[in-house]
Image (cartoon, rainbow, N blue to C red):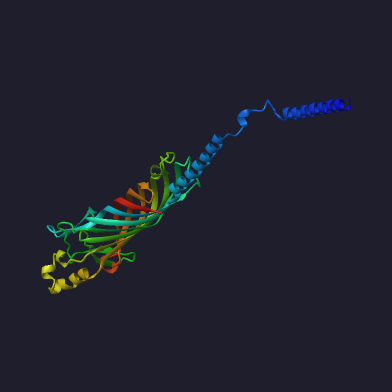
Amino acid sequence: MKKSFFLLCFAFLAQLAFAQTDNTVVSQLDYEEDTLNVTSLQDIINTQELVFDKSFRNKVIQGVWKQKKYFTVSYVNYELKGKDLYLYNKKTDKYNEKDSTFKSDWAVSIKRSRTIKLHKRPISDILQFGLEFSAMDLSVSHFKKNENAYFNSQLKYTVTDDEGNKNDYYYMPFGSEMYNLSYGLHIGPSITIAPFTHLNSRGAANIRLQGYFTVGYRAAFSILTNNEKNDVNYANRNTASIKEDFEKVNDVIKCNWATGLTTAWGIRFNWKRIGIGYEVVKGDLKYKSFSHKIFGKRKYNFSESSKRISLIYLW
């Protein structure tokens, strides 16, 4: 009897414990839970891929826009147009005031510049506005002697100064072989486009197109080479009446200097650290002779125009 009673009590307690456990499990489950929020292994992989792609893309973008300095070497087609120059006419044995154009047979330039960014990150990683600044623009050009470019050391022109004194000066022998050296600096707006930064190609992403327009100031020096045989008095140079004037004109260094404002516009095609470009520079210069006691203080008005085809190194 006692044994049956204990078995009945044990069965009752066991049933009660099982019911409590079952209720606990049921209470921990929420059948209304949104199973879409459960993170799967594929979700983790996709998230890692997105993080990697973003990190990789940022590195690519930083590399594309990192280079902002340029070193340029250019082949130049250089032209100087002189206004109201006194040029010698051998047939009439007179100097006539006329315009004349001098074209270089060779010219080169080197330029160092940089882009100053106006905003930190390019717009959509594609478009960048900036300032083009160049503190060094150096060019050298050579001009051959013009055909029939002679001069006469016996002819002079007279200038009356402010005090009424008259002074005689020799004519500058323009048209002789000439070397020209110029140095300038420029600044102005620029725009850069990297159209392929959104492509999954590092090579295409590094393609950049750039355009700019600048205003600057230039100093120039020209040297006319001395060729005594261009003087029509060469054959009679030792004649007493000719010798002094002949030596004054032919022994002096014929060097002129000028300053003036210039403008320039250009385009560049860049890929990584190399590029090619095309640039046009124009300006007005007023030349004066260093030897003003011989050639006077007259100013010679020139307009310059240079077209440049360039190779570019970026860093």
Q: Nearer the viewer, residue 37 or 27?
A: 27
When asked about the image quadrant of residue 23, the answer is: top right
State whether residue 99 appears in this view: no
Q: Position of residue 128 (x, y in %)?
A: 45, 44
Left or right of 104, for residue 191: right
Q: Residue at x 28, y 56 (%)?
A: 108
Q: How many marks?
A: 0
Asked which quadrant contains residue 241, the reply is: bottom left
Q: Nearer the viewer, residue 76 or 263?
A: 76
Return the residue found at the far right: 2
Q: Nearer the viewer, residue 143 or 22?
A: 22
Above or below, 213 against 241 in this view is: above
Q: Quadrant of the C terminus?
A: bottom left
Residue extending farthest to the left is 235
Q: Position of residue 234 (x, y in %)?
A: 13, 68
Residue pictured at 47% horizontal, 42% vertical:
125
In depth, the one of 246 and 94 nearer the eye is 246
Regarding residue 311, the answer to whether it shows in the image is: yes
* Residue 149 appears left or right of 261: left
Choose top left, top right, bottom left or bottom right for residue 199. Answer: top left
Where in the figure is residue 39, as x and y percent of width and height?
60, 34
54 relative to 221, above or below: above
Residue 136, image x, y percentages: 38, 58
Q: Which quarter of the figure is the N terminus placed in?
A: top right
In the shown orientation, is residue 28 left or right of residue 211?
A: right
